Image (cartoon, coloured by chain):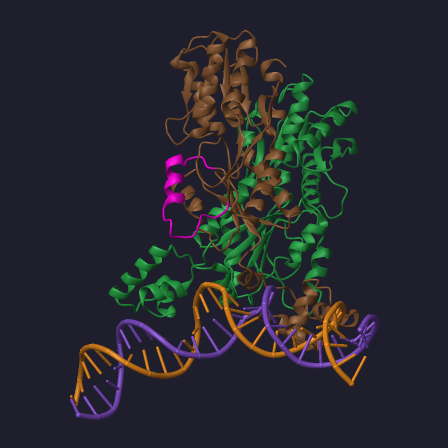
Chain colours: A brown, B green, C purple, D orange
DNA sequence: GCACTTCTTTACAACGTTGAATACAACGAT
DNA sequence: ATCGTTGTATTCAACGTTGTAAAGAAGTGC
């Protein structure tokens, strides 16, 4: 009952032609007599032949598989992104392999080093824990060794190196969100999502935007309003808001560094009988679907995920085709979407 | 600047040994002198050698890659499942390739036919649109042709065939959820998530459970309380609840066939000033994280996702090892988690 | 010293595919 | 007739790896 392996050879024998002719038919080579083609196709069907991708890839040196490396799949932002990337890649005939790094520095290093070398042709990489030094160290490591795998980095351009970048302007976006809260007349705007880890670039940038906004609005900086978190999940947001309320910092608004944090914070606020946006206005970042159905719905920064996915695949495909070109950087548009959590 | 290909051959030359010896070192073969081993390892490092998986797979006839085919990645239930499956597979040294079927019959057919043949060793498959007839047609198609790819099916056992099954008892679970609502004294319990499509097995089974519960609780069946949906997203739940309220069916509870529908329904209720669970109690299915942070938190059926993921990988690994055995069926436990949306 | 075992390393073939080179027609133009 | 040209099909080698068989080295027991 073992699976009989069917190869070009078997098809060729059945059709009475050479192996190469079958290969030609499979690959749509032009110069094949209709008669032969028909015969071969019949044989293919009869044997239910499928080309062996491993062999094809071995021969051609490419696999047609690209990796998408994200921290976690069940963070809705990344799940939504993954769906779009898979769809965009498919249009180009590429298959996407999703790698979860779990936001661990070690696993991100593995990805950057190309540990799936020879299995994938390129990586779309959303680093979270990796510092620019880490990345530089990997890429510059050995001048004699193979050049790094074609890579497209998602996120702010904080990494030097041969990779293309798809950048969301975190600083400006965070500033816009915070200014929006200030424009509502809120004076004690909290920032939820700071991270001590120097490698947490995203957090650093959004915090910078928050700071700029405070300055521009003439609001004082208050350390107690800046709440660190361990990760960017709902639970962290909920805990952070609880700590904030317990500390007596008395915020009247909060800019959360992503939507999950905001949803967690929202839960804590409602649980404790605070009204949103009445007592505390909330803004998030990412525009995940959850925020469109929460009560109240969530004001957020909406990066153009569709555009991120499509351009990431385009950039990567271009780099796989010719790795010689200069690294490119493409700015992804974002916009502030005002909803109920800030009284939209 | 093109990538120089590094193979066993190159390492062998540098280390002054045969290709096979290098291969032995790479594969941890026992009988290698420490001296040789060291020398080879040095060469490997020097050249930054990585084994070529395509070649290895071609040789061994296996790829070490399994596919997880799910309808959509940004349905939180599947995202959570995907994370767990990837983790479980990794422990066994397997890589997971995620395929999105988009719940389209055509794409599900492709998966079942093994269109990634020779690229993957097996599939964990969560069919949504495929009927048992479809599947039977594919599997019985050609007795001469290769046996179907090792497959583990997730969901109720409604498919005959050589695949293993991991079944959640949808009927019982749905019945439990509905009975819970009835036990609260609710008399007009709606069911949100019916689907006309005969292929929508999940919907059919949960509806059957709902019906059983009504009978057991001595409640009358009311067509107007059974609301069909197109898909299982928040938007569908929101629309369904709106239709329900507008129709004057006046429900005092709703069992939603998944948590996303329930969250959508919740949004509509709150938007219209109904209280939950005061006016309408809500129960869902899947126990996604969102439901633990919504306000009110969501009562739901919680299937043991961890167990699903682990056993799916185990079953698949077993079947890949020997495809001769009888198809197995494993029941996955579930439990009712009572939260605020039913006054928990 | 000899046969025997055990350890270490090697040569070779094969996995299924495709690019390059080539053979062989058939054809029109010289 | 001869020469190129074009269309069709084939042969051969190679991609990088590993299983098999076997060769060489080094002991072990008699």
Count of numbered labels shown in the rendering: 0
Relative image position of residue A102 (x, y in whole percent): 45, 39
Residue B75 appears in the picture as rendered: no
Front residue of this view, candidates A200 and A234: A200
Q: Quadrant of residue A108?
A: top left
Relative image position of residue A337 (x, y in whole percent): 62, 21
Q: Is residue B137 left or right of residue A281?
A: right
Residue A1 highlighted magenta (yes or no): no
Dominant SS of magenta comes to: loop
Q: Is residue A19 left or right of residue A172?
A: right
Residue B282 appears in the picture as rendered: yes
Residue A148 highlighted magenta (yes or no): yes
Q: Quadrant of residue D11?
A: bottom right
Relative image position of residue B74 (x, y in whole percent): 60, 38
The span picked out in magenta is A127-150
Q: Is residue A250 above or below residue B50?
A: above
Residue at image point 78% right, 31% down: B224
Q: Is residue B176 left or right of residue A215?
A: right
Q: Is residue B113 above or below residue A328?
A: below
Relative image position of residue A302 (x, y in whole percent): 59, 26
Which quadrant is home to the C terminus of chain B? top right
Front residue of this view, candidates D13 and B18: D13
Front residue of this view, candidates A47 and B18: B18
Q: Is residue B30 above or below residue B256?
A: below
Residue at image point 73% right, 37% down: B230
Q: Is residue B278 above or below residue B40?
A: above
């Amino acid at each position: 009952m073992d699976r009989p392996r069917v190869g070009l050879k078997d098809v060729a024998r059945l059709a009475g032609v050479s192996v190469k002719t079958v290969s030609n038919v499979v690959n749509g080579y032009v110069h094949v007599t209709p008669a032969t083609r028909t015969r071969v196709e019949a044989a293919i069907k009869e044997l239910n032949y499928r080309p062996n991708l491993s062999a094809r890839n071995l021969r051609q040196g490419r696999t047609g598989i690209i990796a998408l490396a994200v921290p976690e799949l069940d963070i809705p932002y990344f799940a939504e992104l993954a769906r779009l990337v898979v769809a965009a890649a498919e249009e180009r005939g590429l298959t996407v392999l999703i790698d979860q790094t779990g936001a661990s520095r070690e696993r991100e290093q593995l990805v950057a080093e190309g540990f799936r070398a020879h299995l994938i042709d390129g990586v779309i990489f959303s680093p979270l824990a990796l510092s620019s030094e880490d990345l530089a160290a990997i890429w510059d490591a050995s001048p004699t060794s193979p050049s790094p795998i074609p890579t497209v980095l998602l996120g702010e351009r904080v990494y030097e190196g041969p990779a293309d970048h798809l950048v969301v302007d975190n600083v400006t976006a965070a500033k816009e969100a915070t200014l929006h809260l200030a424009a509502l007349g809120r004076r004690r705007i909290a920032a939820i999502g700071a991270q001590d880890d120097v490698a947490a670039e995203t957090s650093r940038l959004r915090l910078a935007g928050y700071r700029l906004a405070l300055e521009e609005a003439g609001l004082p900086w208050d350390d107690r309003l800046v709440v660190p978190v361990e990760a960017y999940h709902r639970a962290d947001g909920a805990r952070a808001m609880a700590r904030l309320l317990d500390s007596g910092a008395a915020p009247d608004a909060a800019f959360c560094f992503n939507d999950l944090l905001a949803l967690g914070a929202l839960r804590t606020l409602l649980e404790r009988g605070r009204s949103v946006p009445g007592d505390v206005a909330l803004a998030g970042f990412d525009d995940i679907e959850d925020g469109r159905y929460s009560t109240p719905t969530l004001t957020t920064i909406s990066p153009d995920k569709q555009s991120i996915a499509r351009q990431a695949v385009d950039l990567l495909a271009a780099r796989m085709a010719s790795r010689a070109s200069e690294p490119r950087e493409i700015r992804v548009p974002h916009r502030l979407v005002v909803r109920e959590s800030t009284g939209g």
